[in-house]
Amino acid sequence: MSTERRDHWKEKLSESREALFALLNGLSPEQWQTAVFAEGDTWMVATVLAHLVESERGMSIHVHKIRKGEATIPDDFDLERWNAGLTRRTGDVAPEELMANAEATRAKTLEVMESLEDREWTLTGRHASRGEITIDQYYATIHAHEVGHLSDIRAAVSV
């Protein structure tokens, strides 16, 4: 069963990443500076990619913690506060470096996925916005998050 799940999520994550990178690789330097979100701090295309990288890295850490039987996030975790601090944590990173970071993070995500045993796919941990979810649902969340922000970027740059 885990082979089918693994293959499913590898395919879905590959599809969403290819679509994201196809869009990003076609952007001009000016388009990278397009505002995608303007509530609170303005998030440019580059900020959204940094957010995707940081989020996926965090969810991969959650999977690791779940496997060890550890809590994933503190009870008082504030997702809005965490997201608001994104630009402070990530700084001003060039698009090429952001894309390299995205690739490295995805490679680690897939490495962890490859090591999952059948029984581990149903282990649960607390996700910041979805509540208690399984490891399988963590991969669904990574995929949906990337697809959602791909759509946001497309809309912002009018592609």
Image: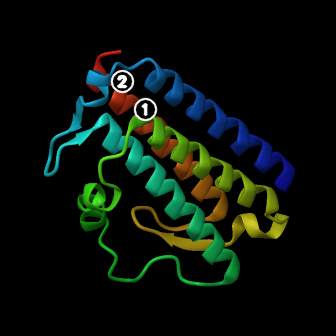
Residue that appears at 32% across and 82% down: 76
- Above or below, 75 against 127 in this view is below
Residue that appears at 59% across and 84% down: 70
Residue 47 locus on image (x, y percent): 32, 44
User: In the picture, which quadrant includes the C terminus?
Assistant: top left
Q: Is residue 53 left or right of residue 116?
A: left
Q: How many marks?
A: 2
- Above or below, 119 against 146 in this view is below
What residue did someone put label 1 on? 150
Instruction: Mark 2: give few (<14), some (14-19) or many (20+) Cα within 10 Å.
Output: some
Disc 1 residue type (three-letter)? Leu
In which quarter of the view is residue 54 placed?
bottom left
What residue did someone put label 2 on? 154
Circle on res. 116: none
Residue 114 locus on image (x, y percent): 80, 56
User: In the picture, which quadrant includes the N terminus?
Assistant: bottom right
Q: Is residue 91 left or right of residue 51?
A: left
Residue that appears at 30% across and 47% down: 92
Which structural element holds mark 1? helix
Residue 140 locus on image (x, y percent): 59, 49
In which quarter of the view is residue 118 placed?
bottom right
Between residue 86 and residue 159, name the one nearer to us.
86
Label 2 to label 1: alpha-carbon separation: 6 Å
Residue that appears at 77% across and 49% down: 5
Between residue 16 and residue 27, name the one nearer to us.
27
Mark 2 in CB contact with mark 1 (< 8 angstroms): yes
